[in-house]
Amino acid sequence: MAEKKYLKSVTIPVSTFENVMKQFDQAAARLNIDQGLLEFLKYPRRSTIVKLPVKMDDGTYKMFTGYRVQHSIVRGPAKGGIRYHPDVDLDEVQALAAWMTWKCAVVNIPFGGGKGGIACDPATMSKGEMERLTRRYTATLYDMFGPESDIPAPDVNTNEETMAWIMDTYSMHARHTVTSVVTGKPLVLAGSLGRREATGAGVVIAVREALNHLKIDPHKATAAVQGFGNVGSVSALYLQRLGIKVTHVCDVFGGLFNPDGIDIEKLINYVKEHRRIAGFPGAKECDRNDIIYADADILVPAALENQITEENARDIKARIIAEGANGPVTPDADPILKERDIFVIPDILCNAGGVTVSYFEWVQNRLGYYWTAEEVNVRLERFMTSAFHDILKAAQENGVHMRLAAFMVAIQRVADVVQLRGIYA
């Protein structure tokens, strides 16, 4: 008898870009838009890969791979952050660029979608090496960047200082200071008040509107926050200020739990000193991987993509999922969450506060006139609240979940602009 051969099961990595394409297709199928036009809207207009030689501190040279993708410039300049991470690749950057197109359309600001990144490990590099890498990346992509063409911003492992290096490098090549080439800059370099807190603040505005819609008293609600970077920490702080008890948080090093609520302000100060949440005396330690399964009313995934999948969606206990990160829920998980009556505030709506205030910063740079923090926050409130109710109305009218409604609204808005402009041939 012939010997039987067994194949080992192989886990196929989830393609983030394929997930975005699925989300697009599901929404597009419900819209009356020409198929050829949908193909034009779907794919990136330009994907660039660059090789970046950098002199390291020890005198050796090392090659890095950088990416910049412009998904769409139909509604305005490409807009999107730059991330530094060992796992950055073209698939991820193309997905993030597409999400930026739809995110800008959802909050109705005049930008298209872009994204960039460099495959590197900032934890192993000095500040000088990071600066030289950033400047090389900027100089190499100088022809892509510009206030009217492509405007970067901070993302994973990049910050205000990174944006200052980009602005300075671009300005040196342009031979004059160009503040509006990036957003997320330090205040003294023409940044905007409220920009650092904007994404987390926008998350909590969306949560507040969802609580009102579902008739849940925030003072009787609990929350779990996955990720304690800028978005996660600000979201947690603002949730607490709204009266919500934040019982679970985690970062890359570990998790914390306190059924009586964690003092987020004290935790933020602790992290500034210790650079991680582990050891914080105001809570018990728990497995960071269990945070998404916490028994809390609100779950804020504010880490990386593909955290909630078809395999674990039935284990989620939260009543509301507020997507602080990009793509934390896969398309196959969405129907399961809807079936279980879990209200998902999709990323292209929920975390759009950051790009909204980036737009404000760009406007202020162009005007040369700067707003107070109160003016910024009032405008952010107006944009986010309006966007939430636009999407909620579309969801109710079409009998679909919030993500599908958000994509339907966004795709239609971009399609309307294309039809008015026409396609140059």
Image (cartoon, rainbow, N blue to C red):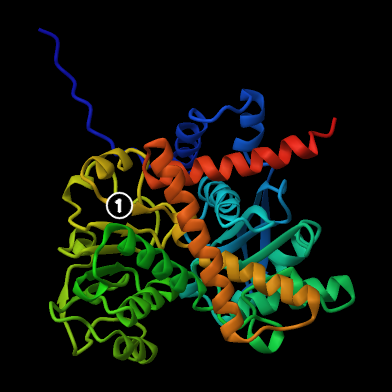
Q: Which residue is drawn at 50% across and 49% down?
A: 92
Question: Which residue position holds label 1?
Answer: 343
Give, as a three-letter code, the residue at label 1.
Answer: Phe
Residue 3 vs residue 152: left or right?
A: left
Q: In this view, does 16 lie above or below 388?
A: above
Residue 272 vs residue 180: left or right?
A: left
Q: Which residue is drawn at 75% across and 69% down?
A: 181
Residue 334 sits in quarter: top left
Residue 398 sits in quarter: top left
Residue 242 vs residue 65: left or right?
A: left
Tell me residue 65's x, y (percent): 61, 56
Asked if residue 401 shows in the view, the reply is yes
Q: Sort mark 1 into few (<14), some (14-19) or many (20+) by Cα contacts within 10 Å.
A: many
Q: Which of 91 and 387 is in front in this view?
A: 387
The N terminus lies in quadrant: top left
Tell me residue 21's x, y (percent): 50, 37
Residue furthest left as drawn: 1
Residue furthest right as drawn: 175
Tell me residue 66's x, y (percent): 62, 57
Q: Is residue 38 above or below residue 294?
A: above
Asked if residue 254 shows in the view, the reply is no
Residue 39 sits in quarter: top right
Q: Nearer the viewer, residue 378 or 51?
A: 378
Secondary structure of residue under mark 1: strand
Q: Nearer the viewer, residue 300 or 8?
A: 300
Q: Residue at x 30, y 38 (%)?
A: 335
Q: Is residue 402 above or below residue 358?
A: above
Q: Which residue is drawn at 22% across and 82% down?
A: 262
Tell me residue 258's x, y (percent): 15, 79
